Image (cartoon, rainbow, N blue to C red):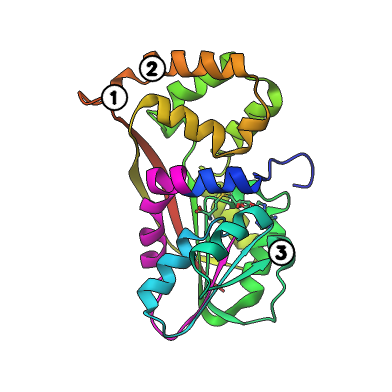
Amino acid sequence: MAGSVETFQLSVDAAEAYEARFVPALFGEWAPHLVEAAAVAPGQAVLDVACGTGVVARTAADRMGGAGKVVGLDLNEGMLAVARRLRPDIEWRQGDAAALPFQPRSFDVVLCQAALMFFPDRAAALREMARVTTAHGTVAVQVWDRLEAQQGYQPFYEVLAHHVGQEAMDLESSYWVLGDLDLIGSLFEAAGLRVAATRTRVGTARFDSVDELVRTEVEGTPLGDRITGEVYRELLAEAQVALRHFTTAAGKAEIPIQGHLITARK
Ligand SMILES: C[S@@+](CC[C@H](N)C(=O)[O-])C[C@H]1O[C@@H](n2cnc3c(N)ncnc32)[C@H](O)[C@@H]1O
């Protein structure tokens, strides 16, 4: 898988926008479901791989009520700076998912939300997750379903495809590349992980307006560095039309988004 895979790297400003806008709108809803799927419990040692600004690690720590240990790891110092500011009580580590800086069997639960698609070497990352998990531990991963399954994001993606260049589209396409459960199953198996359960659910990304959705997608992701002001204005205008079926009477944007929660054991 090595090559020009999108790795979702952000500046500190974009990481702040990610936390302020994207986490409440979208990622925050999924964190309790992932933590629940992994049956995180007080007293455990839990690792959140590619933690970003830390929503999953925070959710796990809250569920554990201070009993046990939570570590969040991410490649990106900008994301970690925000995570540290919000929760200094959690351990935050910089590192690569494909070379986890931990001893074998260090964690009862290893979690990874909305990130496996951004790793250049997904097989190595899954092998690393298996390596640092205890013999009876759990690896739980969340990914988005295929683009064809995304009723709301598909029309938005079509607007993007008309206006943004290839580098920007590589980012947009990468979100959906791990939606095929058979593909995920074989990736897990190759890494020495046995899939114990999968759950597909539909969440709702909630934004105050379609403009706010576009601003979040642009300013809270690497897309912001890859488009011109003119393209940004075109996106703002055309998204209003493309997403009209997902706009409430009060003008809010409510976009369904389908994802998978996969739990596995060694
Ligand atoms: C869409 S964000 C998801 C963050 C977080 N899990 C959440 O749910 O909000 C993807 C994250 O993957 C991280 N990432 C990408 N490649 C990575 C790698 N090889 N090792 C560790 N983190 C990586 C990025 O820095 C980014 O924080």
Q: Is residue 44 magenta?
A: yes
Which numbered marker is on residue 240? 2
Q: CA distance from mark 3 to mark 1?
A: 40 Å
Q: Give the percent coordinates (x, y) of residue 24.
A: 39, 48
Badge 2 element: helix
Viewer-nearest residue: 60 or 183: 60
Report the disc number at residue 95.
Answer: 3
* Disc 1, SS: loop
Q: Residue at position x 44%, y 49% from top?
A: 23
* Residue interval drawn in magenta: 20-49
**Numbered disc 3: secondary structure:** loop
**At label 2, which amino acid type do we have?**
Gln
Residue 27 forms part of the magenta stretch: yes
- In this image, 101 relative to 108: left or right? right
Residue 74 in percent (x, y) is at 64, 60
Nearest to N terminus: mark 2 or mark 1 = 2
Q: Is mark 3 within 8 Å of ligand 1?
A: yes
The residue carrying mark 1 is 247
Q: Nearer the viewer, residue 62 or 97?
A: 62
Amino acid on which disc 1 is placed: Thr
Give the spatial CA distance, label 3 vs label 2.
Answer: 39 Å
Residue 203 placed where, x, y %? 34, 44
Q: Is mark 2 within 8 Å of ligand 1?
A: no
Q: Residues within 10 Å of mark 3 (few under 14, many from 20)?
A: some
Give the mark nearest the N terminus, 3 or 2: 3
The three-letter code of the residue at mark 3 reads Gly
Q: CA distance from mark 2 to mark 1?
A: 9 Å
CB-based contact (under 8 Å), mark 3 and mark 2: no
Can residue 25 be seen?
Answer: yes
Nearer-N-terminus badge (3/1)? 3
Q: Quadrant of residue 130?
A: bottom right
Answer few, some or many: residues within 10 Å of disc 1's Cα (few below 14, many 20 plus, some between 14 and 19).
some
